[in-house]
Image (cartoon, rainbow, N blue to C red):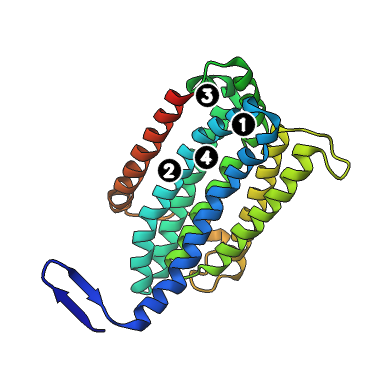
Amino acid sequence: MNYWNGQGCGIIIKDKKFYKKLTIIAVPVILQQLINISTNLTDTIMLGSFGETQLSASSLANQYYFIFYIFCMGLGGGTAVMTAQYWGENDTESIKKTTTLMLRICFLVATGFMILTILFPREIMSIYTKDNTVISSGVEYFRYLSLVFIFHGLALTMTIVLRSVGTVKMPLFASIFSFGLNVFLNWVFIFGKLGMPRMEIGGAAIGTLLARISEFAIIFTYLFFFDKKINYKFKDLIKKQAVNFSEFFTVAMPVIVSDLILVFGNNALAMIMA
């Protein structure tokens, strides 16, 4: 690999094979991230025809959901640093242990978000707005969406592990399928098509939940039954693992904290604008 170190210009890599490999890995990841974000935004866009109340409720509810999403991305990003290093060392056992710890943390946090959403939906919406009609619409949205935290959180973190060992096409396929299904189900449930009742904002939540479940099912099935790189199985998920917690949190926490600072800033802006 050839390098050119220009004064004040850093290091430029001239190896074309490097850029080809980088493109093969990076482009699917970028596309998947855009699709992931777009899936929840689809609810807001498709609710636009029902007026400002439901549009605002969906948008503000997704601000709360975005906190969880960014936490998972930070958790997965920190974990990926470790799993990629282990992959380079051909240490699949350490990858399995780190993956197990990450999935357990994600499940616990997702369960916490789900419980809060089920028990205190009105209080959560009240953080973002004082408009009772918007709050009521947001409560209905949360009522159907609460389970999505577990399915999407686990799908996100499993996806990041697969990416860290160079598996990028399958997660991209899962996201594309989920996005397409979400648009279709939103059309069915929001507008009451194919004999279904018109549910408006509740239908948007149901469409998103079912789409996220499908994404989880694809990623879960691939990781546990078809992936040969990590060879992760049910026994790895349930057995007691000896993990270096200090190393894990030393690597993961800076990523999580930096990402959460950004999302809390966005949430603060949403509260002010509301």
Q: Which residue is mark 3?
A: 124
Label 2: few (<14), some (14–19) or many (≥20) C-alpha neighbours in 10 Å:
many
- Judged from the image, the secondary structure of the residue bearing numbered disc 4 is helix
Q: Which residue lies most toward the right here?
A: 195
- Please say if the residues under marks 3 and 2 sit with CB atoms less than 8 Å apart: no
- Counting residues from the start of the chain, the first of labels 3 and 2 encountered is 2
Amino acid type at image mark 4: Ala
Q: Amino acid at mark 1?
A: Leu
In the image, what residue type sits under mark 3? Ile
Choose the circle earlier in sequence order: 3 or 1: 1
Residue annotated with mark 4: 110
The three-letter amino acid code for the residue at tag 2 is: Phe
Residue at 27% across, 81% down: 14
How many residues crowd mark 3 within 10 Å: few (<14), some (14–19), many (20+)? some
Quickly name the residue at label 1.
Answer: 55
Please state which of residues 88 and 269 is positioned toward the viewer in this rendering.
Answer: 269
Q: In this rendering, is residue 214 above or below 147?
A: below
Mark 4 vs mark 1, CA separation in Å:
25 Å
Quadrant location of the N terminus in the rendered image: bottom left
Q: In the drawing, does residue 65 fall left or right of residue 10? A: right
Residue where numbered disc 2 is placed: 71
| Mark 4 closeness class: few <14, some 14–19, many ≥20 residues within 10 Å | many
Along the line of sight, which residue is nearer the eye, 88 or 135? 135
For the residues marked 3 and 4, what is the alpha-carbon distance in whole angstroms? 16 Å
- Mark 4 or 1: in front is 1
x, y (%) of residue 143?
66, 29
